[in-house]
Image (cartoon, rainbow, N blue to C red):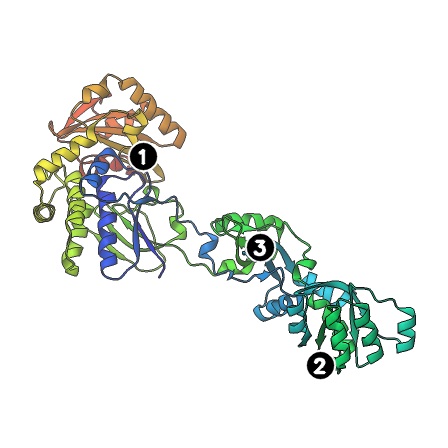
Amino acid sequence: MNKTYIFGHKKPDTDSVMSAISLSYLKNQIGDNTEPRVLGPINKETSYALKYFNLKEPAYLNDVKLQLKDVNFHKNSVIKETDSIYNGYQFMLREGLTGLPVVKENGQFTGLITIKDLSHVVVNENVEDLYTSYNNLLHVLKGEEILRFNDEIIGKLLIASYRSTTFMSTVELKKNMILIVGDRHSIIEYAVESGVKLIILSGDAEIKDKHIEIAKQNHVNIIRTPYDTYHIAKLVALTNYIKTMIRSYNPTKFENTEYVDTVMEINNKLKHTNYPIVDKKNKCLGLLKIIDLNEKTPKKVILVDHNEPLQSVEGLDEAEILEIIDHHNLGSITTNKPINFRNMAVGSTCTIVYNLFLERKVEIPRHIAGAMLSGILSDTLILKSPTATKKDQEAVFHLAEIAGVSYEVYGMDMLKAGTSLEGMSKEDVLYNDFKLYNVSEKTFAIGQFFTMNFESIEKELDQYINTLDEVAEANNYNLVALYVTDIVKNGSYIIYNTKGKNIIDLAYDNEDIKQGHFIPNCVSRKKHVVPLIMEIFDN
């Protein structure tokens, strides 16, 4: 079963991380195969919660773009370099391939052969040298082992086509020769006495016992085949190791983690039909035919705590969205088929996940209760936010009981852990909890940071404004605002990019909003900030 990734938005907060962890646990308990992931570094608050409840930090997910490993290419369509050309030819015919990667015994990629290369050997090439194995000869010639002294056969081919007397008087047999002969006993005797490398007996020819004894003494290999001399002459070239016909030792190849769109871009220039697929250690995994790119298996994903493409993972349009669990306003994500979409007017995505546990009647262990509790307390500011609902309250009471903590004490400790400015740059503060929004083809960004010590930020207000200006300019955002929320004073200080002042003034009824202005009763980005600014962009 393919794994499904569950993740929140690009700038992970406690609710998005904990809802991904908790939902993944629930899904796996009911038989699914899921894994929680994050799309960016976690903040101090989330780190505190993970450590407190002994939860593993989810791995980072860079993107869900289609990769070659998501494509139904010809896996394991490879041939060992010591296999025969005949085997390679038959493999390609059987599988309908026009190319075939050649590998060493350990699977390392060596080169690529094509049907054109094979045709050259089969139709045009007169082979005089043989470089193969005894087993290849037996297999291709449907041979019978008479004597074997060498597993590898290297030598020059020779057919006994003259009269016996003429052959013996004019042809000097050497130890590296491979002789094809019928029941011409005088030539066979001459060959075994000369100590040739190999005798191939055509037409199931008999060989005298005395000749076998001489062959044993001189280490002459002997194979008997039912084929006549003509057919042997045509087939024997195909017994050669397939590595002998490699023309391309360094063809274009791709690792299985390569993106499909990159492969398409390269192929538009090269126009090749076949590409070997390897792993990071150059072990060949198979062959990609360009038409294989039509058969793809997109990565399966479940989104939590967001439903806006701008806030989500790279390559989302190439993935299959199975489900969305969210508590925000509806965004612009579209799917090509119906999905499960759970959107509730509650203060936290973790509250929705908690209710899914109840619906499924799945027992909640302490560490998962702690995860969901942390997410709810974070997003509802310990149930003090106007976004907090009765459902959030019910969930907090029950989860705190399972987790064995006082939700007020634990919640305050967790929020305090996230408000420390120690070691944080201006960008760190902005991106600590940062979300993008797209309205009427315009983009704005809102960062939120909780602190009980705005004075530390106020001392460096000009530097924060410069950071917002740089972010807005670099990304072509119409507005970048940072809301510094003080949960004790129950309000937020606002800092914004210089060019965004007009938008901020309009959002707050044309007041002259100075940098660092305190807005009372403004603690929820979702309820107190985003709707006001969206209305300005809509007009």
Location of residue 217 by image quarter: bottom right
Give me the C-alpha separation between circle 3 and circle 2. 39 Å
Extreme residue in the top direction:
459
Q: Which of marks 3 and 1 is nearer the N terminus?
A: 3
In the image: residue 381, left or right of residue 426: left
State the image coordinates of residue 215 (x, y, percent, origin top left): 75, 72
Q: Are marks 1 and 2 in contact (CB under 8 Å)?
A: no
Location of the C terminus by quadrant is top left
Tell me the tag on residue 275.
Answer: 3
In the image: residue 82, left or right of residue 482: right
Q: Taking the image as drawn, is residue 250 in sight? A: yes
Q: Are marks 3 and 2 in contact (CB under 8 Å)?
A: no
Mark 2 closeness class: few <14, some 14–19, many ≥20 residues within 10 Å:
some
Which is in the foreground here, disc 3 or disc 2? 2
State the image coordinates of residue 223 (x, y, percent, origin top left): 71, 75
Which is in the foreground here, disc 1 or disc 2? 2
Give me the C-alpha separation between circle 3 and circle 1. 43 Å
The residue under label 2 is 226
Closer to the camera in the image, 84 or 274? 84
Residue at 53% in and 59% down: 286
Instruction: Give the vertical position of 209 relative to 374 (above or below).
Output: below
Q: What element carries label 1?
A: strand
